[in-house]
Image (cartoon, helix red, strand yellow):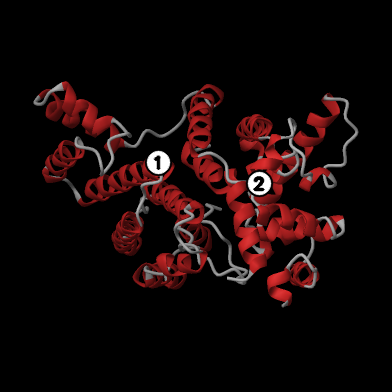
Amino acid sequence: MNRLRKQFKEAKRASAPSPAFKKALWADLDVEFDAVHACKNFVPWYRMAMVPVAALVLFAVTGTGVYAYTSNDVTQDSPMYSVRHGLEIVEERIPKTQRSRQRFNARMIERRLQESEVMFREGKMTETQLTDIGARLNVSFQELSDQASAEVQEGEPVDEVLFNYLQIQNQRFKNLLETNPSIDEAEIPSLLERSPALRNKIEEIRVHIQESDLGSEAKNALLERLPTLPVDANEVSDEPRSGIIK
Amino acid sequence: MHKDEFHLFYETHFDRVYRFLYFRVAQNKEVAEDLTSEIFMKALKSFDKYDPKRSQIAWIMTISRNHLYNHYRDRKEHTDIEVVQFSLEGVDGREEAELTDDVRVLYEMLDTLNDKERRLVEMKHIQGYRYKEIAEIEGRSSGTIRVEVHRAMKKLRLLPQNYESTT
């Protein structure tokens, strides 16, 4: 790496905001959002559905289980992690529809991201963790894309909420990659490029929508719902860097 | 407005807004954090009025710039925010000591560029913007921005401080 590039990388690192501040600010904005917009927000139904299920599971265990299941501080290097993981397996085995399973998987991605963010702050995050999250994201996007493709064919609305949710997790994943000093900037494209299937699938859906018999307004509405493809971190590319919903 | 949309907006622009402010408040993290909070609160309250046809980056950066001007105006400081961006001295003098040699040398090198070149190089290589995004913020073509950043980087590479690349 030449000196100038190293200097810029160091300046970027030195000017990085604290993850704790970012999390705290979002917590404030979350509350403020509800106040400003009078709770018009969508509460994902799978979260509401999870409440009784989780309550049943957690009643069966001790307060330790509650802590292990809910605390963001229980990470992979914690002795409580096996309890957390065990409860997740129980939750995973509860029969679900395809859509609810996808939403469950998306929620698990968020959990792994939260754990990685905590471990990153403590300097314990490994590349294996990131690769695992990247792979989960790819699988979830691919499954979602498959379903969206079928739904479009049947004239049904795609699961926009889950697309949005996954895009947020994808953005958090990118942020983790970009702020992690242990990952060479040059390696980021390869970490984000492990999703050719996703790229192909999204393009396939896009073409399918464009060639369908739907009216132009309906086509545009569906096209707008498709997620932006995962970032290509190539520095010389002019492609948008993030998955913004337009 | 959907909360997820605003959350994605926050995740996408948080780092850049913070970095933009950080270099304009003399690397004072507390001030940068306060201003970042205020800017996103403003954005939240006016997110409904945001015109999706307009670039999100250009929109949030306009809010950030205006808020920063107001910050200096309220403190009755007549400060050119483009000039203070790479000020080496922290508010209590300690920030500078925490900077690594690499960053300190980089700041000295950036001070040799004119305001526009410095701003573009900062956006590209420190704040992490794409050429297309810088073009949206600056209201110019991405080709022009690319050429100007390239020229500025060439100037930096030729500076004697950048001794490794010149030897």
Residue at image position (56%, 53%) is A246
Q: Which amino acid does label 2 sit on?
A: Leu
Residue at image position (68%, 38%) is B95
Whether residues under marks 2 and 1 lie with C-beta atoms below 8 angstroms apart, the answer is no
- Mark 1 — on which chain does it sit? A
Q: Residue B99 carries which label?
A: 2
Quadrant in the picture for the C terminus of chain B? bottom right
Q: Position of residue A104 (x, y in %)?
A: 25, 45
Q: Position of residue A187 (x, y in %)?
A: 46, 68
Residue at image position (46%, 25%) is A39
Q: Which mark is residue A244?
A: none
Residue at image position (27%, 38%) is A46
User: Looking at the image, which residue sits at the far right?
Assistant: B78
* Element at label 1: loop
State whether residue B136 appears in this view. Answer: no
Q: Where is residue B65 in the image (x, y as percent from the top left)?
A: 77, 41
Q: How far apart are marks 2 and 1 (CA)?
A: 21 Å
- Residue highlighted by disc 1: A122
Which of the pair A134/B31 is nearer the observer? B31
Answer left or right for B10 relative to A11.
Answer: left
